[in-house]
Structures are given as C-alpha cells and as structure tokens.
Image (tube, helix red, strand yellow):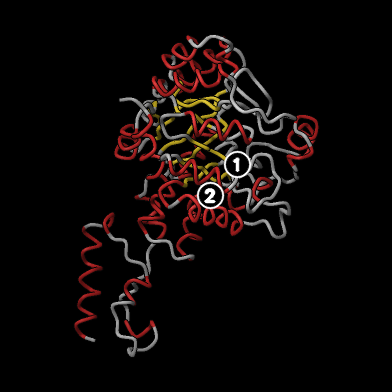
Amino acid sequence: MNKNRRNIAKMLSLGAVFPSQMAYSFSSIMESIPKNVGKPQDIGSVNPLRNIEELYKKAIVVDGLIISRNWNEDSFKALAESGYTGFNASVDSGNLEKGLRNLNEWQTIIKENPDRLILATSADDYNRAKKEGKVAVMLGFQNSTMVGRSIKNLDTLYDAGMRWMQLTYNERNYLGDGSTERTNCGLSDFGIEVVERMNELGIIVDLSHCGKETTNDGIAYSKAPVSINHSMCEALHKNHPRAKTDEQIKAMADKGGIIGIICLGYMIGPNLGTDTTLETYVDHIDHAVKIGGIDHVGLASDFAIQGLEASGATRENWYVPRLTRFKPSYKVQWPPWIPELDKPDRYLQVAKVLDKRGYSTGDIEKILGLNWLRFYKETLKP
C-alpha cells in the first residue's frame, strides 16, 4: 500500500511539471491500488480527480462553425469568455462580388484587432494563437453561389482568404442538391470539377447542408479528407434532412475527415426542454465516436459566439421567419437552444460531461480541438 501511495504522489508531482502530458483519470489511478484496499477515500488527501477547468484552459478549443455576421464588442467579450483557440467563421455568401466584400470585411476586423485575432490559413496558426493568447479565425462560406459557373472564381476567393466552402446549402445550386431539395441527384459534373480544384488549392470541402447523394459524392470524389463541420447523427435524430447516416460518418472518417457536432438544440433532438438536453448532445458525440472513431469528431455551434438568446434571438425575429424559410422536415422549435450550450463557455460544459462519461484526458482534448488541427494539417496547403 505504501508503494502505491508513493506511486500516486509521484504521478501527481509529475503532473505539476508536465500537466499537458498527464492523462490520468480517477479510474486509471484507482487501478494501481489493490482491490482489497477499500473505498476511494482510503487514498487519503491526494485527490486524484482531474481538474476539468484546468484541462480546458490548457486545451486547444476549436468551434467548427460560428455565425459571424454583426460582429461587435459583445462578440469579443463572449469570445474572451469562451476559452476558444479558434473558429470557422461563416461569412455571408451570395454572388462573387458580395462574397469578396464580406471576406474583405472580416479581413479588416482581423487586421484592426491584431492583439485579439489571427487569420487562420493553416494548423500552425491555431498553435500560434494559443501561444499568444489570441483566437484564430478561418474564413469560409455555407454555400458555393459565389463561384457561379466559373471555376476561376475559386482561385479569386482563395486569394481573398477563403479556406473552406460548403458545396451546397439546403437548396440545389450549380454543384449539386442540398439537404431539403425535392430531388436527390448528387454532384453535377461542374460540382466534381469544383471539388477537384478545391483539393488542388487547399480549400476544405464541407458537406454539412448537402443532400444525401451530394454528401456521398463529396466524400467519394474528394481526394482530400472532407469536413462535415456542423451536423449530427441520423441514428439519434431520425429523418432530419441535416443529419448524417452511420454509413456517411464512417465513409467520411475512413478518408480522414471530421464531423463537428452541432450545438443548435432542435437539430439534436425533437423534444427540447424535456428529453433533449446537454446529455443528448454528448450522446451524439458518443455515437459519432463509436461509428467514425475518436480522431474524427469535433464540436460546432452554428450560431453567434455569445449564443442565440444573448444575441437577441426572439420568437418573432428568429423562429417565425424560419417557418417560411425552411421546410417542415427541418422541425424548427422555439426556443431552439440547449441552455448550457447557448453560453460562451459551452465547451467547458461539454468537457465536464465527457469526463463524467469516462473519456480520457487525451480524448477530451481531441474532441475539443486537436482533431480539427489534425484535419487542417491534412487538408490545407502550407
């Protein structure tokens, strides 16, 4: 017993020097104690439980999708409270002129705030942001309408800072069918050409809102790993057009991709406020990890950094318009949020649940952000 006590004390002292290397949970330390020692309190005052707040503070935390319009000082305040290392900014799309203008506006925000933001074009930018106490912002679009019918427009958008692009939104465009389109025809010939050029340039292919066959084609035709940067598991939320099937999650993961589990509450389950909770959200993480593997799952909000309620969403200005913008299959609800996820520290709350469910320190860090960095290293050009 004395030897085991010394081993535990040694592990804890090493953790003080090398905290990022310590992946010991309560269960792993308890395994080093003989079964006949007694109850956990027999180890005395060493308190081997992980400090999740400290783990979170030291981790690289990446949000797969933040709605970035109307960015202001309230956004910066929420960002400071979030613990984020970086995020994918959803820039308003439209035609090429509008897309370029909106990219330029975000470039200006970043340039005017060099003490707070870094333009992200590589995985190294996230490591630098963490080291310097800043936040890395990767610019991209939830549609490809800016490309129009000219493949050359991809180069123009790339030069303007775009590093990820969703092939379709909910509707059909020149590339393929979206998730709520009546037909389900997959990528067009032009869509395949666009994917090939995106691979060549180092633009991330995102499939979050794509229809089922467009998603399948995007995974199949992309030579680089693909992103599903804000979605959920169809196995847990049946018949929602935005959800991805087990077969799609596995195919995406087999090619090195990543899925960011969306925080938008009504996307997670049909009964918000009753049986759709923070635990339900982590159920989607669990399922995606089970199907795709621990290296292919991340996190994503799909709303403003401060949360929907804090950013002024009301039944009249948020919910009612969506009843006409989205088809009934979208199953929009009010309020649309899970309370714990509608705050800047949302991913600290997720980390706490992951810890309670027995995820190791290393696996929690992967889900919080390291999986995104691995993905960026494999898809973005230096």
Q: Which residue is mark 1?
A: 307
The image quadrant where one finds the C terminus is: top left
Q: From what the image shows, is residue 154 above or below residue 138? A: above
**Residue 148 in the image, given as x and y percentages of width and height:** 58, 12
Q: Position of residue 182 (x, y in %)?
A: 75, 30
Residue at mark 2 = 346
Of residues 317 and 279, the one nearer the viewer is 279
Q: Secondary structure at mark 2?
A: helix
Query: Which of the two labelled residues, at mark 1 and mark 2, occupies the earlier sequence position?
Result: 1
Residue type of the residue flagged with mark 2: Arg
Front one among 31 and 200: 200
**Element type at marker 1?**
loop
Q: Quadrant of residue 146?
A: top right
Residue 42 vertical placement versus 103 (above, below): below
Q: Residue at (49%, 38%) from the top-left corner?
A: 64
Most foreground residue, 110 or 220: 220
Q: Closer to the camera, 43 or 81?
A: 43
- For disc 2, the neighbor class at 10 Å (few under 14, some 14 to 19, many from 20) is many
Asked if the residues shown at circle 1 and circle 2 are in contact, with their CB atoms under 8 angstroms apart, the answer is yes
- Name the kind of residue labelled 1 in the image: Gly
Q: Which disc number belongs to residue 184?
A: none
- Residue 12 location, quadrant: bottom left
The CA distance from mark 1 to mark 2 is 9 Å
